[in-house]
Image (spheres, coloured by chain):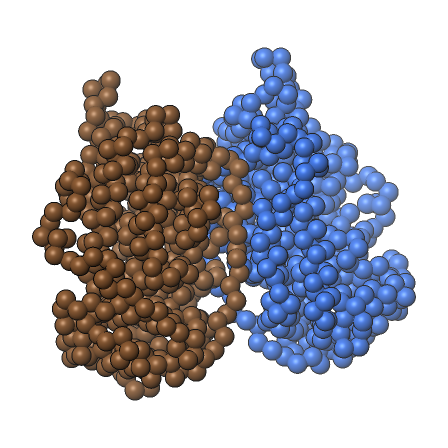
Chain colours: A brown, B blue
C-alpha cells in the first residue's frame, strides 16, 4: 500500500484521538460552544442516525446517510486484528491486509486500486489490534461499483506466492521504519509485552520481526480462510446514499456470499498483577523517555462500576493532557522547579477507553536536559497524587466536556471519521448509538468520580514502568551509519 | 495419571539434575573417585554403547543393552512440548499427555495402565518444555507387549468428550497445586514471562489457567494429529534386550505406522534485551525470595565459542551451588556478616545448559530474618563479581569435575535415567554419544574459561530480577482459608 496507515493504539479510538488532535491544534476551549466555521455549519448529531441491518448470510450492514456532499465512504470491517493472532505468526492480520490488494481470480495484483482510482475514488486500509478495515471514498453514485470490487476480494482474494514474497519484503521494511529504527516504538513494544504476560494484546500489531521473517503464503491463506467470513464482517456506508437502495445492493453483492462459521475465540485472560514491573531499554538516543502504564478497566457500554470508572479515567486523562496547558504540561514542562529547571521537555497522558482487550493508562515524559528519569517519574506520579488528594476543579471538568462536544461535532464533518466510529463501535460489540451514549455518559462524569479513580487505580501494584536510556555503546546517530539487524 | 510428574525446568537436563541430587544427598566430593557401593559396581560408560536406527516411516529407534537385570525400560519420546504451543491453547501438550491414557479403539479409558500393571510393569509420563515422554519398566521379555500397546495409543489415541472434561478438571487441579498455591512457582512463572517477550519458552509448561479453562476436546485432537507423527518420535529401549530383535519388533509395531510430514516450526526468536527488567510479586508468604535470571547461551553440541561458554557456565553454576558448602551457601547462608547476621536462609544457582529454546542462568536466595531483598541481591551479585575478579581455585574446579564423573556413573545405575538422557539428547538433535561428549567437553573446561564467562554474561543489561514479597493485604496462612480464584 502506498500511503500506509498502521493504526497505533493512540489512533484506535476515534473520539479520543480527535480530541487529542483538537487539543494540539489549539482549539479555544474556554468558550462554552464550538465557534469555528466548520463546527458551526454542521447539522446536529441526531439528524442522520445510522441504521443497522443483518444480511442473509449473517454479515452486518450499517448505513448513515449524509447528504452534504455527493460522495460516500465505503468501509469494510473485519473483526480480526493482532489480538486474534497466535505467536509464531504474529503480524499475519496485517500482512493479509496488504495481500487483499494483490488480486482475485478476476483482478491482477494492484488492479483493485486502479479500478478505485478510475471511479474517481481514494482508498486505503489499516490493521489495528482489534480490527482490519478497508475504505474508499467515491462519488456517491459509484458506491455499487465499490461494493462489487470489495465483495470480490473479501470472498475470493487470491495471489501467486511470488506476490506474497514481494509484499513480505515491504512489510519487513515497514517494521524497520515504524519500530526498529524508532527507539521509542521499541520501548512501547517492550513495555506492552511486559505489562501483559498472557493476553494477546501484549504483542505488536505489526508482529515480531522473527515471525514476519518466517511467515509463509500458507499462513496468510489459512488466516484469511479462517477469519474472513460474512458473520465476522460489517460494511459501513456513510454518505449521499439512499438507505434502502444501499441495503438492496449490499444484499446482492455481500449477502449472497456463502455463510461460514465464525471461529471460536479463546479468552486468554491476563493473570493478576500483584506488584510493579520495570524495564530499562538502552538505545541510540540523545533523550531519555519515561513511560508509566497502569492497568485499568475499559468501557464496554454498560453502566456497572467498572464502566463508570472507565469514563472517569477518560476525563482524568483529558484533565492531565487533553488541552494546551493541561495539568501535566503546566506542572512538568512549563513550571520551573526549585532548582531553577523545568522537569520535562514533553509529556503525555493516554488512555485507550475501549477495545476488545484490556487497556492501559499511560503517562509519559521526556526529561528536560539535566533532569534524571527518576525525578520525572516522581513528577508524573505527583500529578496523579495531587488529583487523588485535591480533586479537579469545576472549570477543568467543564473544559474537558466542552472539548468533547466540539470533537464530536467535528467528527461529523468527516464521512471517514463517522464510518470509523461506527465501525469501531461494531467491532467492540456496541450499537450504532454508542457514540451518542458515550458522549452522554461522559457528560455525566463528576469531579468526585475523577478524584475517586485517581485514588484507586494508580498504586505501584499495577504499575508497569519503562525507561528509555541513552546507550553508551550505541551513540545516537550511529544507527543510520550501521546496517540494521533485522533479526532483532 | 496417578503419580504425576510435570517436569520443571530444573529437571530437564538429566545430567545436571543428577548432579544436583547428588549434591544435596551429600556425596563426599573430596575424594577423587566415587566410593559408594553402587557407583563402584557398575560397568564403565563405553561398555554398552547405544545404537540408533531409523525405521521405515522415519521414526527413530535407540537401543542400549544393559544386561545387569532382566528388565527393560521402554520410553517413547515425542519432540513436542510447551515450546511448540501457541497462545490461547498453552498447556495442550500436557493435557494431551494425560489423554493418551484414555483409550484407543481397542482400549477403554485407563485400560492401558491396567495392561502395563498386568505385565508386571511400572509406568508414567511427563511433559516438559521441549518434549513429551511415556515410559514403562517391565520384565525384559515383555518389551514387545509394551511396544504393541504404546504403538496403538501413539497412532490411534481416541476418547469420548466426557473423558476429556473429566481429565481437564484434573489438570486444573494440578495447576492449582503446582502453581497457583505456590507463590514461588508463580514468581518463576512471571519471571520467565517477563524475561522472554517473543520466545515461546516464556509460557508455563502447564499453560495459563485461562487457556486450560478454555481448552476443548478439538484443541487436543488437533494437536495430537499435528505432532504425533512417526518422524517426530523416538523410541528408546534400555535393558536386557537383544538389539536386532528389538529392532525387528520396533519395525513391526512402530515402523509400519503411516508416515506423515512433521509440521514446520517457527523460530520465534527473542528480540535483544538491552536493559534490566524487574518485577515484584506480592503474595501470601512469610519469607521473601529474590531471583536473578541472566540470558546466556546454551550447549548445542558444537565447539564454537558460544558452546564453549555454555560449558564454562555449567561449571560456574556448579562452583556456586554444586555441592554442600559451595560458594553461595558459604558466603550467604553460613557466613555471618559485619552486622552479626547471615544474609540468606537458602540459596540456589541453576543453569539449564541444553534445550530447544534459549536458556537462563538463575541465582536465587531467601533472605534471612531481618535482611532486605536488596542486600541479598547485592550479595548474590558480589559472588559473581568475586569470580569475575579473582577466578576459581584449581581445587574447586577439580571438585566439580569429580562430582560430574560420579554423577555420570550413577546415571548408568538407572535404566530410566539412561533412557532419559538418550531421549533428551535426541530431542535436542544430538547423537547417542552426546552424553560422553558432553562429559569430555566439561572435563576440558579451564578455570580461566569460568572466570571469563563470569566477566562477560552478568551485566545488568541482560538481567531479569523477580522479587517475591509478603503482601500486606494477604497474610500467609490466609490463603488456605479462602477459596482460590482459578481465573488468576
Q: Nearer the viewer, residue A422 or B460?
A: A422
Answer above or below: position of A448 versus A93. above
Answer above or below: position of A319 versus A228. above
Q: Is any atom of residue B104 visible in this view?
A: yes
Q: Is residue A110 left or right of residue B394?
A: left
At horizontal 88% and vertical 63% (from top left) the residue drawn is B117
Q: Quadrant of residue A84?
A: bottom left
Q: Is residue B46 left or right of residue B233?
A: right
Q: Nearer the viewer, residue A356 or B32?
A: A356
| Residue furthest left as drawn | A37
| Residue furthest top as drawn | B339
At horizontal 39% and vertical 77% (from top left) the residue drawn is A55
**Residue A115, how many percent across, how many down?**
20, 80
Q: Is residue A222 left or right of residue B438?
A: left
Q: Quadrant of residue A195?
A: top left
**Residue B39, how many percent across, how many down?**
81, 45
Q: Nearer the viewer, residue A399 or A463?
A: A399
At horizontal 87% and vertical 57% (from top left) the residue drawn is B68
Q: Is any atom of residue B246 visible in this view?
A: no
At horizontal 60% and vertical 78% (from top left) the residue drawn is B260
**Residue A145, how many percent across, how many down?**
23, 81
Q: Nearer the viewer, residue B345 or B30?
A: B345
Q: Quadrant of residue A377?
A: top left
**Residue A183, how many percent across, how many down?**
30, 46
Answer above or below: position of B130 versus A334. below
Amino acid at each position: 500500500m502506498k500511503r500506509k496507515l498502521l493504526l497505533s493504539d493512540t489512533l484506535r479510538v476515534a473520539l479520543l484521538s480527535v480530541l487529542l488532535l483538537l487539543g494540539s491544534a489549539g482549539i479555544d476551549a474556554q468558550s462554552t460552544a464550538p465557534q469555528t466555521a466548520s463546527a458551526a455549519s454542521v447539522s446536529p448529531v441526531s439528524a442522520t442516525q445510522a441504521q443497522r441491518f443483518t444480511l442473509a448470510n449473517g454479515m452486518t450492514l450499517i448505513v448513515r446517510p449524509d447528504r452534504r456532499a455527493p460522495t460516500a465512504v465505503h468501509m469494510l470491517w473485519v473483526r480480526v486484528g493482532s489480538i486474534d493472532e497466535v505467536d509464531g505468526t504474529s503480524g499475519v492480520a496485517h500482512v493479509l491486509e496488504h495481500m487483499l490488494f494483490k488480486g482475485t481470480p478476476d483482478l491482477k495484483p494492484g488492479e483493485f486500486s486502479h479500478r478505485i482510482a478510475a471511479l474517481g475514488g481514494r482508498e486505503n486500509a489499516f490493521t489495528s489490534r482489534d480490527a482490519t478495515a478497508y475504505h474508499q471514498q467515491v462519488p456517491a453514485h459509484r458506491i455499487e461499483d465499490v461494493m462489487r470490487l470489495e465483495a470480490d476480494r473479501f470472498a475470493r482474494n487470491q495471489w501467486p506466492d511470488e506476490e506474497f514474497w514481494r509484499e513480505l519484503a515491504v512489510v519487513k521494511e515497514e517494521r524497520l521504519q515504524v519500530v526498529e529504527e524508532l527507539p521509542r516504538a521499541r520501548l512501547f513494544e517492550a513495555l506492552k509485552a511486559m505489562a501483559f504476560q498472557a493476553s494477546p494484546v501484549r504483542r505488536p500489531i505489526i508482529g515480531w520481526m522473527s515471525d514476519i521473517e518466517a511467515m509463509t503464503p500458507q499462513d496468510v491463506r489459512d488466516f484469511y480462510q479462517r477469519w474472513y467470513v460474512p458473520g465476522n464482517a460489517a460494511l459501513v456506508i456513510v454518505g449521499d446514499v439512499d438507505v434502502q437502495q444501499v441495503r438492496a445492493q449490499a444484499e446482492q453483492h455481500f449477502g449472497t456470499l456463502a455463510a461460514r462459521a465464525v471461529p471460536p475465540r479463546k479468552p486468554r485472560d491476563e493473570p493478576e498483577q500483584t506488584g510493579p514491573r520495570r524495564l530499562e531499554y538502552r538505545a541510540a538516543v540523545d533523550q531519555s523517555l519515561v513511560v508509566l502504564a497502569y492497568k485499568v478497566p475499559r468501557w464496554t457500554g454498560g453502566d456497572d462500576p467498572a464502566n463508570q470508572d472507565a469514563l472517569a479515567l477518560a476525563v482524568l486523562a483529558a484533565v492531565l493532557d487533553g488541552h494546551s496547558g493541561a495539568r501535566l504540561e503546566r506542572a512538568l514542562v512549563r513550571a520551573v522547579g526549585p532548582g531553577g529547571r523545568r522537569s520535562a521537555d514533553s509529556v503525555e497522558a493516554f488512555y485507550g477507553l475501549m477495545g476488545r482487550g484490556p487497556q492501559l493508562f499511560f503517562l509519559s515524559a521526556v526529561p528536560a536536559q539535566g533532569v534524571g528519569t527518576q525525578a520525572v517519574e516522581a513528577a508524573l506520579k505527583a500529578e496523579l497524587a495531587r488529583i487523588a488528594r485535591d480533586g479537579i476543579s469545576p472549570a477543568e471538568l467543564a473544559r474537558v466536556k466542552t472539548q468533547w462536544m466540539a470533537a464530536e461535532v467535528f467528527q461529523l464533518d468527516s464521512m471517514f471519521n463517522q464510518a470509523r466510529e461506527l465501525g469501531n463501535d461494531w467491532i467492540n460489540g456496541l450499537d450504532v448509538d454508542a457514540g451518542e451514549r458515550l458522549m452522554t455518559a461522559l457528560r455525566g462524569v463528576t469531579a468526585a468520580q475523577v478524584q475517586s479513580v485517581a485514588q484507586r487505580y494508580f498504586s505501584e501494584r499495577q504499575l508497569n514502568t519503562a525507561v528509555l536510556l541513552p546507550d553508551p555503546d550505541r551513540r545516537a546517530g550511529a544507527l543510520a551509519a550501521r546496517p540494521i539487524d533485522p533479526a532483532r
